Each structure stands twice: as C-alpha cells, then as structure tokens.
Image (cartoon, grey):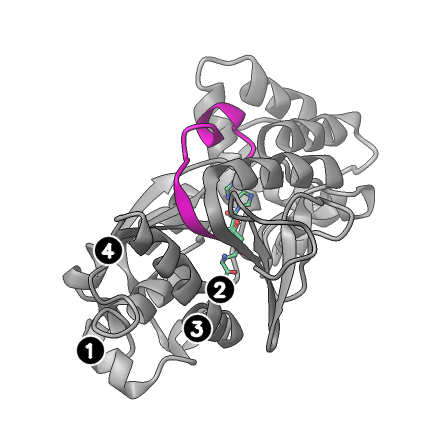
Amino acid sequence: MAVGLAKDKSSATSAQADLSDPGYLKIRDLIYQISGIYQPEEKLYLLAARCARRMNVVNAKTPAEYLEHLTVRGNREAELRLLLNEITIGETYMFRSPPQLEALRTVVLPQILEAKGKMGFKRLRIWSAGCSTGEEPYTLAMFLVEESDKLLKGFTFDIMATDLNDNSLTAAKAGIYGEYALRNTTEALRRKYFKPVDDKKLQVTDQLKAQINFDRVNLSDNSKMLFLKGMDLIFCCNVLIYFDLASKRRVVQHFYSNLLPNGYLFLGHAESLYQVDDTFRLVHFPGTIGYWKPSAGYKDGGKP
Ligand SMILES: C[S@@+](CC[C@H](N)C(=O)[O-])C[C@H]1O[C@@H](n2cnc3c(N)ncnc32)[C@H](O)[C@@H]1O
C-alpha cells in the first residue's frame, strides 16, 4: 500500500461517516499542514475511516470533537502522531529497485568516491528518507557491505533512515521480515545477513543493523530538515507521490541543500522532479533516473 491513505478494510466505519461534515476537511488540512500529505476530496472517505479508529479510542463522537483532540487538548501532539501512524502506510520490500543499485555500482559511487578520495574524505553518508519498515536502508546496507572490499575499499559508510510513522520505525529497528519483504532477496544474502526467527521469519543480523541509524523525521518539518546536511546520497522513493506540488518543492529544496556537491537524489520508479525542481540535473541510467547536484566546477551542458 502506498503512503497516503490506505484502502480501509473497515468499510462499515467509512460508510457511516458523513463526508460532508466540514470537520473532515479541517482534519485533512491539518494533516497537510503538518506532514505535506495531501488528500483530495474524493479520497476523504479513506481519511474518515482512518479517523474513525482514533475517534473510537478517544471516544470522540464527531469530527469536530476529534479535531479538538488534535488541536486543543493537552495531548494533542501525541494524538496527531497517532493519527499520522494510522494514515501513512508504507508498501515496501527489499531490493525494490535493482536498476538504482546498478547505477550506484557503475556510475554514481565511482564518481562520488573518486571526488571524495581526492579531498581525503573516506566516509559516505546516505539517507533513506521515508524508509517505512526498513527494507530500503537494509537493502542499501547489504549492497554496500557487499561492495566494501571492492568499490568501497578504504571507505566506510553510514546510513540514516527516517520516517514519520512510529510503528514503521519500531518494525524497522526490529528488522524481522517474512517472505513478502524478502521475495527479491537471494538465498546467499539471506544466509549472510539474516538469522531465523521461526520457520517463516528472518531477522537482520546485529552487524547489519549497526550500519543504520533509524530516527523519526517529518520531511515537512523545516527546522529539522535544516540540520541534516552533508549527504552523498538521498533515497526518497515512493514518498512524495502523495504530497502536493508546494510541499514536494519544499522537501526537494531541502534535499538539494542537504546533499554535498556531486551527490545524488533517487526517487521511486514512477516519480520525477518534472515541473517540481530545476536545480538538480537529471541523469539517465539503464532502467532508472537519478538527480545530480552539480559539483562546484560544473559548467551547464557538460556531463556529470
Ligand atoms: C510507500 S513507503 C516507501 C518506502 C520505501 N522508501 C520504498 O520505496 O520502498 C512511504 C513512506 O513515507 C513515509 N512518509 C510519508 N509522509 C512523510 C513525511 N512527511 N515525513 C516522513 N516520512 C513520510 C510513510 O510513513 C511511509 O513509511
């Protein structure tokens, strides 16, 4: 399920909701203001279903009453966080985009490592922004550990993996996965980087976990975004699809200033920065695209 409003199974609750109630629009606008996630009017029934769960828990009888819990009551911040946990559901799996890894192997990393090496820097910083339950950062960690004696020889790396959803982050830190998440993961990698939990689940080894720092970051929190500088690579895949143009632009501008010169931003397979941003340079790779932040001496029209 993509981020934004998940299809809700409790159709009874959504069917009962009065979608013309202006309270839902106010809750929709509040979510947008806080998270950048925009829910069009035709999807309000999904929002109503998600709110219904929290409304039941806090015993709010109407959207207006629930809005009070979100905006006025003492525990409003906690309640908003719990609602955001309901709303953002992250479909993801390991090795979701092999062409991105191939682009890293063949072009992106050689280019970045050469430039960093010349300046005497030996550490790579990577950010998985909107990491959901952790499959994307663990994939990157496996890929980079596999490359550590080859491409990355002499370099170390750290991965920061962030999300808005507390439940997803808890699952990511636990690192326990079933066949759905692991369907693209080879037997060799399963044996090397996972240990069995039971006959259906595998858990990421502590060594691999040690490569990643998980943290809660709301991509629409400008004050936090200002402090995440010095990245070589940012992966923000399948996250911005439910943001509107204004929030996409804000987040992408932060990514630009958070990347070091020569760094790359990767988005999801169906996403692009067309009409969102023209500061990055679009770079085509087989089966994927990346967005490059030009190095200091770059002249427009040249190749990255
Ligand atoms: C579809 S998942 C993508 C997971 C992974 N990047 C991938 O492509 O497989 C989208 C994730 O974005 C997160 N997200 C949505 N809005 C966010 C925001 N404002 N700040 C941080 N994370 C957000 C959701 O919680 C969800 O886990």
Secondary structure category for the residue under label 2: loop
The residue positioned farthest toward the bottom in the image shown? 187
Q: Can you tell which of label 4 and label 1 is closer to the viewer?
A: 4
- First in sequence: mark 4 or mark 2? 2
- First in sequence: mark 2 or mark 1? 2
**What count of labels does the image hold?**
4
Q: Which residue bears the numbered disc 1?
A: 192
What's the CA distance linking mark 3 and mark 1?
15 Å
**Looking at the rendered structure, which numbered label has been put on residue 211?**
4
Q: Does 304 appear above or below 147?
A: above
Q: Does 170 appear above or below 64?
A: below
Marks 2 and 3: in contact by CB < 8 Å? no
Q: Which residue bears the numbered disc 3?
A: 95
- Taking the image as drawn, is residue 181 in sight? yes
Q: Which residue bears the numbered disc 2?
A: 92
Q: Is mark 1 within 8 Å of ligand 1?
A: no
Secondary structure category for the residue under label 3: loop
- Taking the image as drawn, is residue 194 in sight? no
What's the CA distance linking mark 3 and mark 4?
17 Å
The span picked out in magenta is 220-236
